[in-house]
Image: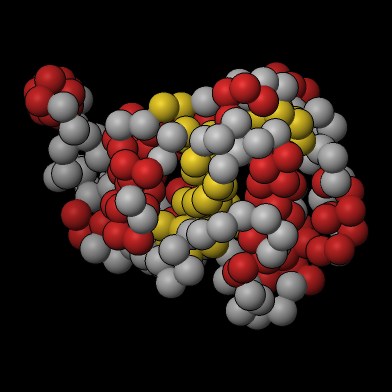
């Protein structure tokens, strides 16, 4: 973090103490600029086995992600971006990244929610690793997000052609990190990766905040592209589906 940011955060912390956002905690956060206290932070389910995610989609991260995504808890973006940075740097060379691209929302969904949670993550992450953010070039051209009750294969078919690169010159020859909040079947990441590679990207690395490990990780309120299909996935389904076709990691 830049010195000035640290000072600003320290002043904010002194004036408005932050309460830990973890469910049932309620302690003041003792970590500068963070909404997760040090005791809760020590229990977070870090998960970097496949070099593609910061966390496993388990408590308390699962609840925090739901608040972030569905209940307007955008203040968690800073903590999540910091986690993405730590996890990414453990396995990857940030200096080899040209662009950070979020999985886009369809404009209908963006209007509904008011923000793209993956865009917030990508923006914070890009700033922390000092690389360029590009949230305009990849767009979602079909609104498939409400059709959540499908099998993994059905979801995959349904997403085909849902994403498009509208400014190929921005991604051509570039090494891209593709950011999303939760990875389930990998169908969404696959489609975005294909769109970016088709547009001439040199390399696409999917990286997510949390990887779902099993069906029961998902509550009934979780509705997003690919998410419902996680219920039909076997436990410990392979994570490399994201990358089967083109992406190189
Ligand atoms: Zn706490």
Q: Is residue 91 above or below residue 174?
A: below
User: Could you tell me which quadrant the N terminus lies in?
Assistant: top left
Residue at the (83%, 55%) spot, across then down: 156
Residue at the (10%, 25%) spot, across then down: 3
Q: Is residue 45 above or below residue 123?
A: below
- Name of the residue lying farthest toward the bottom: 235
> Does residue 249 appear to the left or right of 55 in the view shown?
right
> Does residue 43 appear to the left or right of 118 in the view shown?
left
Q: Quadrant of residue 118?
A: top right
Residue at the (60%, 31%) spot, across then down: 172
* Residue 45: image location, x then y, percent: 38, 66
- Name of the residue lying farthest toward the front: 173
Residue at the (36%, 31%) spot, across then down: 131
* Residue 205: image location, x then y, percent: 52, 50
Q: Quadrant of residue 51?
A: bottom left
- Between 53 and 79, the one nearer to me in the picture: 53
* Residue 162: image location, x then y, percent: 81, 38
> Does residue 147 appear to the left or right of 1 in the view shown?
right
* Residue 122: image location, x then y, percent: 47, 35
What scheme was used to colour the molecule? secondary structure
- Between 185 and 57, the one nearer to me in the picture: 185
Q: How many marks?
A: 0
Whether residue 105 is visible to the viewer of this picture, yes or no, is no
Q: Is residue 137 above or below residue 26?
A: above
Whether residue 170 is visible to the viewer of this picture, yes or no, is yes
């Amino acid at each position: 973090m830049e010195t000035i940011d640290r000072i600003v955060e320290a002043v904010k912390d002194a004036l408005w103490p932050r309460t830990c956002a973890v469910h049932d905690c309620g302690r003041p956060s003792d970590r500068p600029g963070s909404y997760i206290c040090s005791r809760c932070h020590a229990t977070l389910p870090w998960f970097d086995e496949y070099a593609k995610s910061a966390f496993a989609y388990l408590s308390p991260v699962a609840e925090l992600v739901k608040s972030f995504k569905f209940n307007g808890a955008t203040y968690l973006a800073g903590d999540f971006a910091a986690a993405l940075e730590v996890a990414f740097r453990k396995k990857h060379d940030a200096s080899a990244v040209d662009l950070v691209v979020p999985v886009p929302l369809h404009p209908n969904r963006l209007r509904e929610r008011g923000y793209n949670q993956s865009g917030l993550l990508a923006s914070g992450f890009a700033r922390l690793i000092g690389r360029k953010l590009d949230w305009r070039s990849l767009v979602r051209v079909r609104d498939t997000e409400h059709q959540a009750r499908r099998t993994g294969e059905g979801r995959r078919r349904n997403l085909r052609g849902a994403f498009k690169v509208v400014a190929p010159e921005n991604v051509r020859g570039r090494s891209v990190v593709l950011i999303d909040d939760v990875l389930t079947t990998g169908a969404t990441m696959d489609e975005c990766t294909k769109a970016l590679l088709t547009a001439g990207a040199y390399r696409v690395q999917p990286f997510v905040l949390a990887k779902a490990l099993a069906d029961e990780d998902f509550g009934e309120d979780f509705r997003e592209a690919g998410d419902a299909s996680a219920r039909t996935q076997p436990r410990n389904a392979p994570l490399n589906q994201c990358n089967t076709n083109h992406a190189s990691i």
